[in-house]
Image: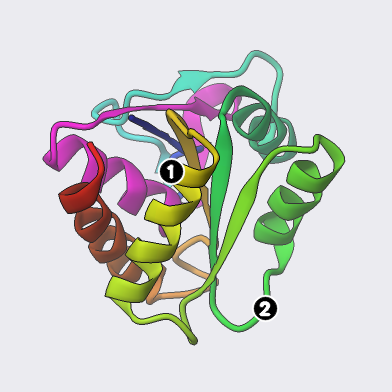
Amino acid sequence: MKIVSGAQTGVDRAALDAAMEHGVEAGGWCPRGRIAEDGIIPDKYPVLELPGAGYIQRTRKNVKDSDGTAIIYFGKPSGGTEQTLVFCIRGKKPYVLIDAEVFKLEQAANKIKDFVERNAIFVLNVAGPRASKEPRAYGYTKEVLLCLFKYVH
């Protein structure tokens, strides 16, 4: 299994951190200049710059290049999280929606595990809100993925 994201703060970085800490392959595409809301994406994140791209192009490429996407949100997808869902639907790519206000950590991990198994996902894109939009995004996502890695690796 490989975890990919755009390395933005919040959900994206939590997914990459959980993968790297657990020895799971990690990667994905990020915008030109390795930009994120907190400045330059640190070199420890194994993401590739998408030439000439901003956030939207990076999001589209991560959806396209993955086998499926786990979309984590709190209450209702909005902004880039909602755009990820649109790219999945338009590109006919499998996705699973995880409302963090509904699913406890173990439930969310099991829902993603079932999605991965049902759709034979090898490369899982993980998307959701940035830290400034949802302060709980990093902690929730990291715990869910660490729980997921107990089942799938």
Quarter placement of the N terminus: top left
Vertical side of 144 occupied by 34: above or below: above
Q: Residue 104, position in %: x, y?
A: 35, 81
Vertical side of 140 occupied by 28: above or below: above
Report crowding for label 1: few under 14, some 14 to 19, many 20 or more residues within 10 A (C-alpha).
few
SS for callout 1: helix
Give the residues in magenta.
Answer: 10-38
**Comes first in the chain, label 1 or label 2:** 2
Mark carried by residue 31: none
Residue at 29 percent of width and 26 percent of height: 43
Q: Amino acid at mark 2?
A: Lys
Q: Is residue 81 left or right of residue 131?
A: right
Spatial separation of the CA atoms under disc 1 and disc 2:
26 Å
The residue where tag 2 is placed is 76
Quarter placement of the C terminus: top left
Residue at 24 percent of width and 29 percent of height: 44
